[in-house]
Image (tube, rainbow, N blue to C red):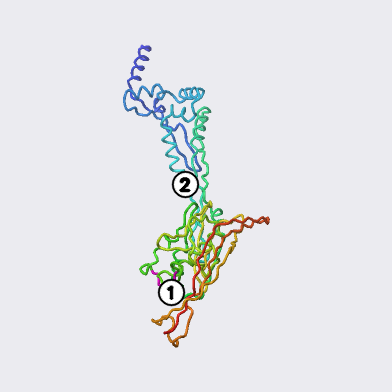
């Protein structure tokens, strides 16, 4: 009867549903492997994956999933000798292992926290830097290698290989971008209250600007339209070679101050325009005229990190400062006047509205605006290196028109 019993058992085995290998002999289920990370443990039970249909069942049998771990290890060895990756070979014979490792990864993996910088231009300190934190990531390829060697050596416990994920932005790196790179100021002490208001308003909208690497600064975009609705007042502006009243007068002094600070900070100037007349607050070839009909001041940050702009006014000065990483050289400016014409004679006009001559006797005169000769000039940048080497670069050539002074005569 014994041979018959063996044959009967064989038939029952073939027709029975697959089960956990560890449960074939009725013993208690125990994990095949235990993955360890610190005090955490992640058990892997060697189960037979439930086939969806007969075709899948046949595939499982071809892959040896109905065999013991030791028998499947022989298949893994053969696949590796044939040139397959260890991970692919292990998962070929232990497909449910992937799900267990991925669930452990979901608990362990942590993204790095990047350092952040906050620019507070009107506070002290001006920069607040949040420190970074390293992340971590399970090294899957190494884990599968460790699983393979654990199976070969009969080991139960596998230490999960976890590598640190370092942040790209650290507090140390970001602090390098808080150095004063350039500063420039112009005087507006003799300006009218309206003109001072316009300059201060324009700079207040620029103050606190952060220009990331590759980003382009546009004066018109940041400041907005120079209209009464946008907060600007009427003051003197230059139109067609003469001074006249217009809303937003004085804003060009703000753009000019920003322009010079940008030059000395090493920004790439992509758009700049001259005035028709030489302005009184900066040397020839270093002005930056802006208006609402297309003339804009633009520059690009070609550096590898952020640039921070502080812009403000005092009672007498218009000030702009650029902060970023230090340049390998110091930049200064040089204005060269190539030629200068004769100053035209003053033009007198009767101030019938008593706009300029209120309280004056008839025939008394007062200068309303000064004249200027025609000027042909060049703008140069001088790069001075620590070793004493010096490099000069011509950045522009300009022709300014002459203008006659205007004298108001009391009627």
Judged from the image, the secondary structure of the residue bearing numbered disc 1 is helix
Seen from the viewer's position, the closer of residues 295 and 106 is: 295
Residue 128 spot, x, y in % from top left: 51, 60
Q: Point out the frontmost of discs 2 and 1.
A: 1
Residue 273 counted in the magenta span: no
> Does the rendering let one see residue 315?
no
- Residue positioned most to the left: 53
Quarter in which the N terminus is drawn: top left
Residue under label 1: 194
Residue under label 2: 111
Q: Which residues are magenta?
A: 231-237
Residue 238 spot, x, y in % from top left: 45, 68
How many neighbours does mark 2 have within 10 angstroms: few (below 14), some (14-19), or many (20 or more)?
some
Residue 232 counted in the magenta span: yes
- Quarter of image, res 225: bottom left
Question: If you read the primary sequence from the N terminus, does the residue marked by circle 2 or circle 1 appear first?
Answer: 2
**Contact check, label 2 and label 1, Cβ < 8 Å:** no
């Amino acid at each position: 009867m014994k041979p018959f019993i063996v044959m009967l058992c064989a038939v029952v085995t073939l027709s029975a549903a697959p089960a956990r290998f560890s449960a074939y002999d009725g013993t208690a289920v125990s994990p095949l492997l235990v993955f360890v990370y610190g005090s955490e443990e992640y058990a892997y039970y060697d189960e037979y994956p439930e086939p969806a249909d007969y075709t899948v069942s046949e595939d499982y049998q071809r892959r040896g999933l109905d065999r013991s771990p030791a028998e499947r290890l022989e298949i893994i060895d053969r696949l590796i000798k044939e040139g397959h990756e260890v991970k692919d070979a292990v998962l070929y014979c232990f497909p449910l292992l992937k799900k267990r490792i991925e669930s452990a990864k979901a608990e362990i993996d942590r993204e790095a926290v990047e350092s952040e910088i906050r620019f507070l231009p009107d506070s002290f300190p001006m920069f607040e830097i949040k420190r970074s934190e390293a992340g971590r990531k399970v090294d899957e390829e190494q884990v599968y290698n460790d699983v393979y060697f654990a199976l070969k050596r009969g080991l139960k416990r596998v230490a999960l290989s976890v590598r640190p994920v370092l942040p790209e932005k650290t507090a140390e790196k970001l602090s390098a971008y808080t150095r004063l790179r350039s500063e420039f100021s112009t005087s507006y002490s003799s300006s009218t209250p309206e003109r001072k208001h316009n300059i201060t308003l324009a700079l207040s909208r620029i103050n606190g600007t952060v220009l990331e690497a590759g980003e382009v600064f546009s004066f018109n975009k940041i400041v907005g339209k120079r209209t009464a609705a946008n907060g600007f007042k009427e003051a003197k502006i230059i139109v067609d070679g003469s001074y006249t009243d217009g809303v937003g007068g004085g804003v060009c002094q703000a753009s000019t101050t920003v322009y010079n600070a940008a030059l000395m900070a090493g920004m790439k100037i992509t758009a700049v325009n001259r005035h028709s007349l030489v302005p009184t607050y900066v040397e020839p070839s270093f002005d930056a005229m802006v208006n609402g009909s297309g003339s804009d001041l633009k520059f690009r940050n070609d550096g590898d990190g952020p640039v921070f702009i502080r812009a403000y006014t005092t009672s007498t000065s218009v000030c702009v400062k650029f902060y970023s990483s230090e340049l390998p050289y110091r930049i200064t400016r040089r204005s060269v006047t190539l030629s200068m014409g004769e100053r035209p004679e003053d033009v007198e006009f009767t101030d019938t509205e008593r706009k300029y001559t209120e309280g004056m006797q008839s025939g008394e005169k007062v200068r309303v605006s000064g004249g200027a000769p025609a000027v042909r000039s060049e703008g140069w940048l001088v790069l001075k290196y620590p070793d004493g080497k010096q490099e000069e670069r011509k950045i522009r050539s300009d022709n300014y028109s002459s203008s006659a002074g205007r004298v108001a005569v009391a009627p």
